Amino acid sequence: MQADEKTIERLRKLREEINYHSYRYFVLDDPVISDGEYDELMRELIDIEKRYPELATPDSPSARVGLKPVESFRQVVHTHRLYSLDNTYSREEVAKFDERVREALGSESVRYACELKIDGLSISLKYEKGVLLLGATRGDGFVGEDVTTNIRAIKSIPLRLRKSLDIEVRGEVYLPKDVFDELNRERISEGLPVFANPRNAAAGTLRQLDPGQVLKRRLSAFFYQVVEPMNYGVRSQEELYEFMRELGFRVEPNHEIASCTEEIVAYWEKWTARKGGLNYAIDGVVVKVDDYLQQQELGYTAKAPRWSMAFKFPAEQVSTVLTGVTFQVGRLGNITPVAELVPVQLAGTTVKRASMHNFDFIRDRDIRINDTVIVEKAGEIIPQIVKSIQEKRDGKEIEIEMPSNCPVCGGDVGREKEGEVALKCLNPLCPAKLIRRITFFSSRDAMDIEGLGERLVERLVDSGLVSDFSDLYRLTKKDILKLGEGVGDKMAENLLSSIEKSRKNPLHRLITALGIPGIGTKLARDLAKRFGNLEALATASIDELTSVTGIGEELAKSIREFFSREAVKREIDALRSQLNTLEEESGARKPLKGLKFVVTGTLKNYSRNEIHELITSLGGEVAASVSRNTDYLIAGEKAGSKEAKAISLGIKVITESEFEEMIDL
């Protein structure tokens, strides 16, 4: 069936509108429609393209959905070399750089563009007539890898520019810190080795053969360079920032112009202190001669431009002695080696233990007990061993051996699949697996059972009171008091109250709590919206699962395999009689759909998390700050400045009781 003119015109307008709203969201950081309205536009677009596949184009906003896995990455020869930068940690070297530039130019009139150096992965993108043609990694600067398919899965990168140009741009792909933290929490809960830092995670993600995984991990990007910019009438780096925004590219917003060494150093000092407050990792500042004619005059060395340098932040690493190794068993049975250290101060905290990821990591780096080792914080959060300093060995070092039995249950250990990195406990009844799984089930992002931490779970499991998820809902006050020391009436009552409250959690929390490999909180929400109830999800086909944005074929197969396990079926059947969340109709009442709320002050009947959950469950959106896009401000006691801002913007301010009237509570 051929599309009529009306359908073709609607398709054109949809693409134009979606691209505009993506530009407002990613580049201007000023959306003018809600996420729900955006999703509706996208759904309509996808529906038309499914009915008329001949109308689908590679630059359509829908091209990010359903991208097919690639078998390998072909090499790409860069038409213009991607140079590296000379690095320094020294103010004196910055002063010498400034002197060399002024002397070579024979001019005192030099301005420098100072930018934050994103700790990510360099990429080069080519567009023809404004349409993305090629995305490649830096590689060695001469030859990179074609990662175009994965680039298309990064929502902040435009598939079509706002001007029809043939152009090549350079930028940095990165993993936001909050996404990195969420990803590592998921990996820890699944017994998988954590990513060392956001840069490694971004690099590993961009080289995934399944673009669905790239979409799931929510990479982002900033852009800072155009090849041959003066061909487009751009004469300086300062002008380039606005030019790139006009094209539809994200530009890191904290750039400044400096006119001397002192101003460069002041910029560096400011961001040395403030870098922890950003949601992306930076490892220094990049200093560039601002004027492009002056850049041309200065030229390049064999390795780097003479007109630019990187002024790096001090490294946050320390050395200490590895005194021993303990082994942790994750909820999937993965055995993780943990280094015991002579306590040392690192990034403001005392570090006594650090991850060593897996036994291949230990073997490849030849790390031994009694070694002096370098420790850093992965993503400024998780302490990890980087390497051993073998020059300091004195003969007392002891090789680290893999355990021959599970350190918890004494069961057999091994690798479940050929080529798998993780060593696992193979005993399906290992109590460590149960303890970790129940701890995860009750965690804040899952069923949010307050007061049920790992130590208490361990006591409940060891006492025989809890052997699966559903046992939590059969606990009585008498049962809990049997645990003895440290457990009193008040604690038992509070725990039972929190367990009771969790029976009515929204479906997405239960999906998260089940611990489906590869499913975090974001995908759990998407699955809940798509399938409406757990039975529909558990029986969904591969095609149905891959229709959810962020789920590729491999992850869909993993979900199907999870729900096909007899043990999982028994767990769900046991939970069915205990919870009220197992049936949530996808057509449930959504009175707040399309509305954006901000909550401020202290409420009488809700904690902040509870009111946020309620708004979301009824179709609304929650924002952290008041803007012109806010529909309602819910104001409790001591509302403060947000209320004043809402009033000044003409935004409706409502009380808690007025909100409850709105949703008929």
Image: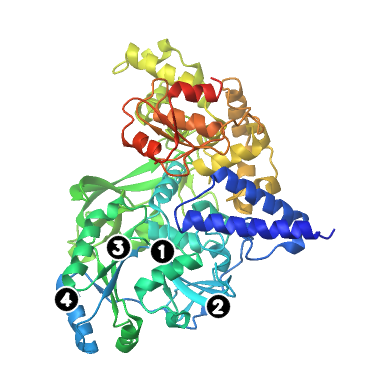
Q: Which mark is residue 95?
A: 4
According to the picture, the residue beneath numbered tag 2 turns out to be: 166
Mark 2 and mark 4: Cα distance apart in space: 38 Å
> What is the crowding at mark 2: few (fewer than 14 residues within 10 Å), some, or many (at least 20)?
some
Q: Judge from the rendering whether residue 338 lies leftward or rightward of residue 149; answer left or right.
A: left
Residue bearing the label numbered 1: 251
**SS at mark 1 in the image:** loop
Q: Secondary structure at mark 4?
A: helix
User: Residue at horizontal 58%, vertical 26%?
Assistant: 581
Q: Earlier in the sequence, mark 1 or mark 3?
A: 1
In this picture, residue 246 sits left or right of residue 293: right
Q: Residue at x 37, y 29 (%)?
A: 453
Q: Image quarter for residue 15?
A: bottom right
In the rendered structure, the answer to whether residue 240 lies left or right of residue 416 reads: left
Residue where numbered disc 3 is placed: 283
Q: Report, in whole angstroms, how far the alpha carbon at label 1 lies from the one at label 4.
A: 27 Å
Does the residue at mark 3 contact the one at mark 2 (Cβ under 8 Å)?
Answer: no
